[in-house]
Amino acid sequence: MKINSICCIGAGYVGGPTMAVIAQKCPHIKVTVVDLNESRIADWNDANLENLPVYEPGLDAVVAEARGRNLFFSTDVDKAIDEAQMIFISVNTPTKNYGAGKGMAADLKYIELCARQIARVSKQDKIVVEKSTLPVRTAEAIKNILDHTGNGVQFQILSNPEFLAEGTAVQDLHNPDRVLIGGEDKDAIKSLVDIYANWVPAEKILTTNVWSSELSKLTANAFLAQRVSSINAISELCEKTGADVSEVSKAIGMDVRIGSKFLKASVGFGGSCFQKDILNLVYIAKSYGLHEVADYWEQVVIMNDHQKNRFSRNIVQTLYNTISGKKITLLGWAFKKDTNDTRESAAINIAQNLIAEQAKIAVYDPKVSEKQIKEDLISLDENQLKLIQVNQDPYEACHNSHAIAVLTEWDEFNTYDWQKIYNNMLKPAFIFDGRNLLDKKQMTKIGFTYIAVGSSNL
Ligand code: UDX
Ligand code: UDX
């Protein structure tokens, strides 16, 4: 099937950028991205590209090039499904918060709703592509629903997991390390391979069976997260022994068998995928009775929780065991730099922990809105919420603070006038650098008590 019309259900961090790049690179294909969320679609259609709902460097230029030409954003899901030969499912698959598998399994409610809607609306044969990260063998469930429509329409299911990282999504989509396509039907696979072949070299397009493809996505995220937890485990040991985790990272990373990436000690990993996908893997392993496998991977998440909690505990202990009434400034709220996404961001945990100790929190993040920050803290009561203020200006956020915690590695933090910030803080002035971003020597010279992750402060 030569594809000239695509629909994507889900205009989020994955669906939006991925479809924008497909449309950019394939001007001969009409790409319609649909979503139930009307305000999200309105933002994707906003004439002012600064209002796109997803912030990603370079995304505005891609959208500007393709939108209105062959890239469309709409809430008319039925129409887009009906018109498309190929449908990507890119809806969210959060961790289940009820019933069996609560807190671990992926909630496939939205996926099933999509499958049922596709089954109901389709009048012609279609290829359905799983883009969302899914538990192994989900394709089987989707196929089951689609095959029982009774109206004779044929569906082929492919798995095409997305490996883009937020903050570098456009770059990752333009130059992927690999594109993975899992499926059984050769023609359907070829239709999708042909789309990517418009800009991705053939040797980087990998085809596998559906189950390998689904499992590869979970495994890739589990391995990446495991590296972060591994180096974070070592960071705690470094703090006790006088070793420096940056030096250890460099030394081990130069071994080509280990490699240098994903070895940066931090306040803990965040993002919508790592924790969810590992818990999902753990749940699947348990459901097959593989308890050792499940325990092995669960430890990655346990270590990450420990890293976040010990970071906030260290702030309390260092500030003479009480932070009640003290102002602490959080620089950064996003789960990493160059994104406005805050899902599972370590900042949320840190803020909750500090507020539980009755600290006053000031937050500054260059891309995250006050509304989002307040939504992330929805579990706090009214009095606790009064303890949090969000500033538009970093200098104001730091004014009269007892301590600063750097929680996101935004480049701009390195460009600040730190002498000025120091002058306006209470003394002793502390910096807890959860990203090892700032220059320790410079900070110490100014007079800060500078505390990094993974190096001894003796
Ligand atoms: C999501 C998943 O979290 C991830 O596992 C997967 O790999 C890709 O999809 P993301 O794009 O970051 O990632 O999620 P999100 O930004 O929440 O976007 C999902 C969108 O789907 C939302 O805009 C939501 O409104 C929409 N949606 C959800 C529908 O349009 N229909 C539904 O039935 C459910
Ligand atoms: C991840 C995967 O990288 C991507 O392939 C997949 O499609 C989705 O999940 P993402 O969560 O967007 O992408 O960002 P990533 O760069 O992987 O960072 C995840 C978290 O780990 C961030 O909080 C980041 O700050 C943290 N991290 C990463 C570290 O703490 N140290 C590191 O060395 C690397």
Image (spheres, rainbow, N blue to C red):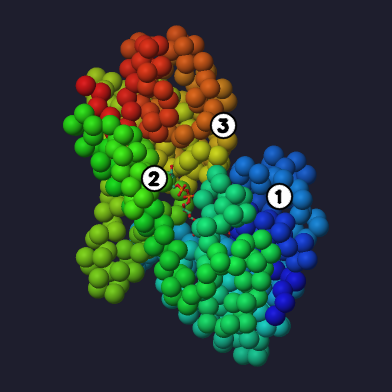
> Which residue is identified by label 3?
366
Query: Which badge, 3 or 1, comes first in the chain's sequence?
Result: 1
Q: Position of residue 162 (x, y in %)?
A: 53, 60
The residue wearing badge 2 is: 260
Quarter placement of the N terminus: bottom right
Under 8 Å from ligand 1: the CB of mark 1?
A: no
Counting every numbered tag in the picture gives 3
* Residue that sits furthest to the top in the current view: 423
Callout 2: CB less than 8 Å from ligand 2: no
- Disc 3 to disc 2, C-alpha distance: 28 Å
- Residue at 51% from the left image edge and 50% from the top image edge: 165
Q: Tell me, yes or no, if residue 27 can be seen here.
A: yes
Residue at (56% x, 78% y) in the render? 157
- Picture residue at 25% right of the left edge, 59% below the top: 296
State the quadrant of the C terminus: top left
- Mark 1 sits on what residue? 62
- Dot 2 crowding, Cα within 10 Å, few <14, some 14–19, many 20+: some
Pointer 3 local density, CA inside 10 Å: few below 14, some 14–19, many at least 20: many
Where is residue 348 shown, x and y percent of the image?
Answer: 42, 39
Which of label 1 and label 2 is nearer to you?
Answer: 2
Which amino acid lies under the numbered mark 1 shown in the image of this protein? Val
Q: Secondary structure at mark 1?
A: helix
Amino acid tagged 2? Ser
Q: Quadrant of residue 220?
A: bottom left
**Distance from label 3 to label 1 (Cα)?**
22 Å
